[in-house]
Image (cartoon, rainbow, N blue to C red):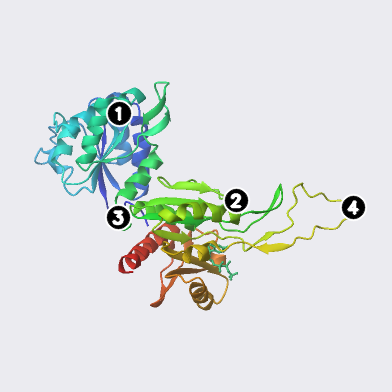
Amino acid sequence: MQDLASKRIVLGLTGGIACYKSAELLRRMQDQGATVDVVMTDAARQFITPVTMQALSGRPVYAEAWDARVPNNMAHIELTRGAAAVLVAPASADFLAKLAHGMADDLLSTLCLARACPLLVAPAMNREMWANPAVQRNVAQLRADGVAVLGPGTGSQACGETGDGRMLEPHELLEDLVAFFQPKVLAGRRVLLTAGPTAEPIDPVRVLSNRSSGKMGYALARAAREAGAEVTLVSGPTALPAPRGVAVLPVGTAHQMRDAVMANVRDADLFIAVAAVADWRARNASTQKLKKTADSGPPVLEFEANPDILAEVAALPDGPWCVGFAAETENLDAYAEAKRRRKRLPLLVGNLAQAAMEADATELVLYDDAGRHALPAMAKLDAARRLIAEIADRMERA
Ligand code: CTP
């Protein structure tokens, strides 16, 4: 599903070199189904032309307070009525100051004042400007007024300096914008997750691992953060980028995963174990690389059991609400329900392994005290959002 389907967003541009990123942002918003109306200040038009934004948005661009194209000539009112949000990106120091003081001396500032929808701003400025107490005061005021402040990011700046103040990248802004619209069903909760495979050494260059991609765990971490939670993700080796706003703790072995979980579980309200933890590790892993020699045959590995992280967390007195996963190749109902009872979990999520491991879509079945509840097949991110809603609902009732 497109994350901004049937939403009209007003995208405001103010004066800053980051305007070049706003063209890309507009495209990414459209990819997610948004209709975008662009409003530009005079200063923004020094950096990027209305023609570019009009061609990309496929809609008229607005710059003047008096605009005869709007039937009642009240663009400052009409543009935000029915809009899902106003996003000002880039938001210059000057524009933030205007907003903080309720000034309305051009179309964009007037429209922000007259709006009846949420306002998000993506600051973009030199690091010294961002650090200036006047700017910080204005940003604090805007936050207190209920304005969502996205970023800024940190790194090298167009002026040649390095520090805080650069506008977030278009994909980061898109992720934050999408998150903004998700219901905050886990607001104030702390969520700890495991994801991905573990990798158990055979020797310093070889590991035993599995085909888990980590996609479901990462999607759940993202969905939990979108739902307002503070999220820590303990992750085995994956090729996935860290979800925005999620603290990722990378680990290799099951033991490392257990230690990272135990170090963070005290603060957690909810623990979701999605990792495909190796059940065994090599007892006789070599400290040197194993060599092929003519006389010795292939190495013989001996195994010993790894700790069961989920069972350990579920057995903690006053521990978090626990959710387990079961990927099976057959007999899903019987195996999943047995696993749930064995580990004493309020909720276990089952899926069929071959279909699930690397795919982008998944079909989940929930098992709890009330029985079995199948969810329709969905993209993993949609399934993750649905699952977070199901979990929040159950935690509320527990
Ligand atoms: N899990 C865990 N630590 C382990 C093994 C599994 O935390 N050492 C968690 C997984 O993250 C998942 C659930 O427990 O949430 C899976 O249960 P498990 O019984 O270990 O599944 P399998 O390894 O698939 O078990 P089986 O071999 O019995 O099918």
Judge from the rendering whether residue 102 lies leftward or rightward of residue 383; answer left or right: left
Residue at image x 26%, y 28%?
A: 135
Q: Position of residue 306 (x, y in %)?
A: 62, 61
Give the residue type at disc 2.
Gly
Please name the residue that numbered disc 1 is placed on.
49
Residue at image x 32%, y 66%?
A: 393
Q: Which numbered tag is attached to residue 294?
A: 4
**Mark 4 secondary-structure assignment:** loop
Q: Is residue 240 visible?
A: no
Instruction: Point out the frontmost of discs 1 and 4.
Output: 4
Instruction: Give residue 93's quadrant in the image.
Output: top left
> Which of the two discs, 3 and 2, labels the residue nearer the N terminus?
3
Q: Mark 3 and mark 4: span between their CA atoms?
A: 63 Å
Q: Position of residue 45 (x, y in %)?
A: 27, 26
Judge from the rendering whether residue 257 lies leftward or rightward of residue 176; answer left or right: right
| Residue toward you, 249 or 109 | 249
Give the residue type at disc 4.
Ala
**Ligand 1 in which quarter:** bottom right
Q: Mark 1 and mark 4: span between their CA atoms?
A: 71 Å
> Which of the two discs, 2 and 1, labels the residue nearer the N terminus?
1
Please name the residue that numbered disc 3 is placed on.
184
Q: Which numbered tag is attached to residue 202?
A: none
> Which of the two discs, 3 and 4, labels the residue nearer the N terminus?
3
Q: Residue furthest left?
A: 72
**Mark 2 secondary-structure assignment:** loop
Q: Mark 2 and mark 1: span between their CA atoms?
A: 49 Å
Give the residue type at disc 3.
Lys
Q: Are marks 3 and 4 in contact (CB under 8 Å)?
A: no
Q: Mark 2 and mark 4: span between their CA atoms?
A: 32 Å
